[in-house]
Image: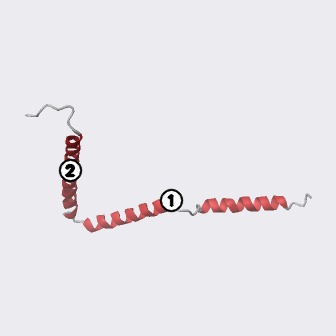
Amino acid sequence: MTQPSRQGGGLDEQAVLLVAGLADLAFSTIGSATSALKGLVRRSDAADLARDAEQDLMARGRLTLDRYSAQPAHLEVLAQHVVTRSAASAGTDGDD
């Protein structure tokens, strides 16, 4: 039988309940993850899965670094060169 929920309770009691709830959630999540990993290890294509996962992680890392790197995109650099050349050639028309 469940106990009726108590209103109030001190901050200490609330903190303990919160930590206990988080710990229970963490342990159940770890248990589920462990079961899933055991299932993956038993597969005959585990080496292929590991290689694919490594390639996926490397591609994701490459995309992340490209997204946050200070270097401008290649096409953007080319477009800036075109604009610079157009402005330079427009300035040297000989209309002066």
**Residue at point 79% right, 62% down?**
88
Q: Quadrant of residue 49?
A: bottom left
Report the residue that reaches farthest toward the left: 1
- In the picture, measured across the screen, residue 10 lies left or right of residue 3, that is right
Q: Is residue 31 above or below residue 70?
A: above
Marks 2 and 1 close (CB-CB < 8 Å): no
Give 24 or 15, whichever is nearer the viewer.
15
Q: Which residue is mark 2?
A: 23
* Image quadrant containing the C terminus: bottom right
Q: How many marks?
A: 2
* Residue at 33 percent of width and 67 percent of height: 51
Residue at left offset 19%, top offset 52%: 27
Residue 36 occupies quadrant: bottom left
Q: Position of residue 68 (x, y in %)?
A: 50, 59
Residue 56, given in percent of the width and then of the height, sits at 38, 62
Kind of residue at disc 2: Ala
Farthest right residue in view: 96
Q: Position of residue 92 (x, y in %)?
A: 85, 62
Camera-near label (2 vs 1) is: 2
Q: Residues within 10 Å of mark 1 (few under 14, many from 20)?
A: few
Of 2 and 51, the residue lying toward us? 2
Tell me, for residue 68, which label it has, or none.
1
Q: In the rendered view of the protein, which quadrant contains the N terminus?
A: top left
State the SS at label 1: helix
- The picture quadrant where one finds residue 71 is bottom right
In this picture, residue 73 sits left or right of residue 52: right
Q: Nearer the viewer, residue 42 or 29?
A: 29
**Nearer-N-terminus badge (2/1):** 2
